Image: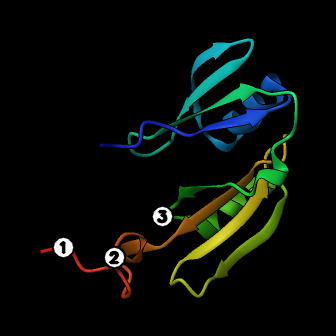
Amino acid sequence: MNLNQVTLPVVDTDAAIAFYQGMGFTLIVHSPHYARFECPEGEATFSVHLSDAPSASNGAVVYFECTDLDARVVELQKRGFVFSRLPTDERGLWREARLQDPSGNTLCLFWAGQNRKNPPWRVPAAA
């Protein structure tokens, strides 16, 4: 299996489209209640769908990998994006910055290098 996409609930589709396009994502599907984006790097996509309630309380965090994390955060700040956490080295051997989209969804821009899938504490493969 391969992960196809993650869909986030939003309270304003147009605001979400403007936000994610402003971050550099490419809009590939658009309807009044749904939008889908391609990530600037790789093959991943994600989408948003219209919802009656903001999602800030659901606890989900969407992680977007950025090899140029610090420079990307500076660039986004220049465009007016506000981060709740600036790039910080974390215990899990990665570096991350966090912000929220207009509906309150938490986004984490991060860089973990090889530790992304192969941290020192990775579970050994089954024999």
User: What residue is drawn where x is 86% and y is 40%?
Assistant: 54
- From mark 1 to mark 3, how far is it between C-alphas? 31 Å
Query: Which is nearer the eye, 52 or 24?
Result: 52
Q: Circle 1: is it few (<14), some (14-19), or many (20+) Cα within 10 Å? A: few
- Disc assigned to residue 94: none
Three-letter amino acid code of the residue under disc 2 = Asn
Three-letter amino acid code of the residue under disc 1 = Ala
- Disc assigned to residue 67: 3
- The kind of secondary structure element at disc 2 is loop
x and y, in percent, of residue 102 in the image = 85, 41
- From mark 2 to mark 3, how far is it between C-alphas? 16 Å
Q: Which of marks 3 and 2 precedes in the sequence? A: 3
User: What residue is drawn where x is 39% and y is 45%?
Assistant: 42
Vertical side of 63 occupied by 113: above or below: below
x and y, in percent, of residue 1 in the image = 30, 43
- Residue linked to disc 2: 118
- 43 left or right of 37 in image: left
